[in-house]
Image (cartoon, rainbow, N blue to C red):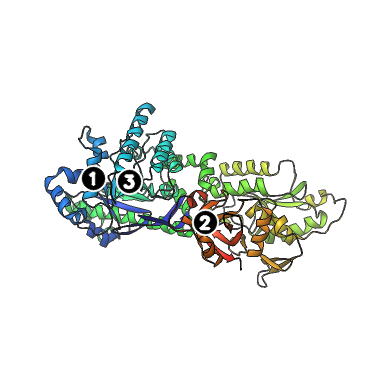
Amino acid sequence: MKFEIKNRDAAGRTCRFTTKHGTVTTPALLPVINPNKMIITPKEMKRLFGTEMVITNSYIIKKDKKLKEKAIEKGVHNLIDFDGPIMTDSGTFQSYMYGNIKIDPLEIVEFQRDIGSDVGTILDIFGTPDQTETKATEGVQETVKRAKQSMKVKGDMILACTVQGSVYPNLRKKCAEKLSKINANFFPIGGVVPLMENQRYSDLVRGILASKRGLNPSKPVHLFGAGHPLIFPLAVALGCDFFDSSAYIKYANDGRMIFPEGTKKLDDLDELPCYCPVCTKFTASELKKMKKPERTLHIAKHNLYVSFAELKKIRNAISEGNLWELVERRARSNPHLLEAMRELRKTENKTWLEQFEPISKNKALFYTGSQTIHRPIIYRYHKRLIDRYSFLSDSAAILPDGKKPYSKYYSNEIREILAKRNDVEIVVNSHLGPVPIKLDEMYPFAQSIFPEVTDKETEESIKKIFDEFMRGKKAIFWKGEKTLQNLSKPQEKTTKDRDLERISAVADMQFGKNASKALFDGKIRIVKSKKTGKIRNIYCDEKHVLSMRAGDGLFTLKISGAKMLHNFFKYPKLRVIVQEDATPFVKDGKSVFAKFVLNCDEELRPFDECIIVDKNDDLLATGRCILNKIEMSSFNFGMAAKTREHIN
């Protein structure tokens, strides 16, 4: 098995999952195939929807004599006529649904192995939402015991070991940790179907987050039984890679049509609010007049078209860096899902999710409502403002939100303020929180779009951050000419280099408090764009130390700058430490692969600039992180950091 991150946003990721029967791009949907009754064949699914992987049930196959004999003789791929990767379930859900079904835990794993499943599943103990914690604990213990036993008989088959724990987050985390320690290959999160059926999405979110905290991040995560696209965006943003759907056919049998924002009965529709091939070919009236088998087939196809289209939207959102916006928009279509989003406002959840957030995005940050201000990336910048920004004055002139960039929009006001009081800080009280004018071109301050008036909750949140940021400082709120008259002149007139203050503030925010003292300790030369007048390159004693990116207002670290930061910050600050075997390749300009990483600064984030060193802390190169620390420590495939410049 090979599992490699290709792109990322939020805690979501697009990955390449490779098995002996092919490679799957995640996030992926696995349609459930009933080998006794294939309304749409897997081969047809591949042709119509681009289906790369399916799931079928080994218990159903094993209990049917003809299916069992054919599967043993020719394999499960021949049985359902599909040449791509196949996952098989063990019968856990059937045991939960129908009670006392006799299944031997090891026999069913051996059977999946023998029929050639790419991914087989253990027979876990289904944790129901109404269980006591004691009962759920017993189920987890038995699940882990069976997982350990099953690992010994799985052969070359990828084995899915299911995380259980009912509605108890601590129990799910412990289960996940124990399954990770036995080096399982694939992690379904189980026992969630009753939660989704009853729209208990807050419990679902807590369960996913608790499971992810305990799981090895280098392995795929499958949200078992999640087949409705309504939940896909949020689940992906929390780190789920796979989904399976029997809903497409179950709903179709009941005349229900799936849409991204929910489900509708065909009988209640006058028109079909969809442009999939089914809905453009038939009207609602024509579908209603069909005989049930034909109508069921067409609705099932519609349901799959919509489900696969939603995953395409999600993968595009990851690529474009706006997955949270898709999540927030989808959540607003369902009150229970919107309520579940409140779980993500908790500090412990924002802290965990922030580790996986890229340092900046390809597109501007869009406000969608009260949830936006609680995004992990905004939480990160608020925290860095408090921890890393250095005030050069004990007072600040506070300007209201305006057009971006603020330094251009408020150029006259800034000039007038500085003429009266050149030692004062200038801060914009924006919809994102306080923005020192020195940081106004940095992501996400410049690259965000908010309405002129936001919601009350956002206003209260930014007031709290503003008060914390300004604690101990005098805030002088801008009221035009009246404010200028009240600005007292400083006792001593000083000359300040505003460009140097700007690059110093950005460097401290990006690399760590006081990083500017290391980078700008010498004669500074700043090169600006002739076209825009914006800062582009910074030299210290004629050494090129930094380049400022136009897209996000952050720095690209040059090798001379890396040397300065390496000497200034103590190990392991900003470092990615590589094995001896990788040293000559990095020195030659090759990028760092995860399997060669020994350690990493825990504060480095995806797409952060980093310093690459060997085990003796000798500087090798400067680069850009692809993974964070816990990922670098776990993945055996893929790039951990892309080398930019190396020591000659």
Q: Secondary structure at mark 3?
A: strand
Left or right: 74 as drawn, with respect to 277 = left
Q: Identity of the amino acid at label 2? A: Gln
Tell me: residue 475, above or below residue 73: above
Q: Provide the residue designation for mark 3.
A: 160
As measured in the structure, the alpha-carbon distance from the residue carrying label 3 to the one carrying label 2 is 31 Å
Q: Secondary structure at mark 2?
A: loop
Quadrant where the C terminus sits is bottom right
Give the image location of residue 139, x and y in percent. 33, 32
Tell me: residue 51, above or below residue 465: below
Find the residue positioned furthest to the bottom: 530
Q: Secondary structure at mark 1?
A: helix
Point out which mark residue 110 bears.
Answer: 1
As measured in the structure, the alpha-carbon distance from the residue carrying label 1 to the one carrying label 3 is 13 Å
Name the residue rendered at 73%, 49% in the picture: 391
> In front here: 458 or 181?
181
Left or right: 164 as drawn, with respect to 64 = right
Point out which mark residue 579 bears.
Answer: 2
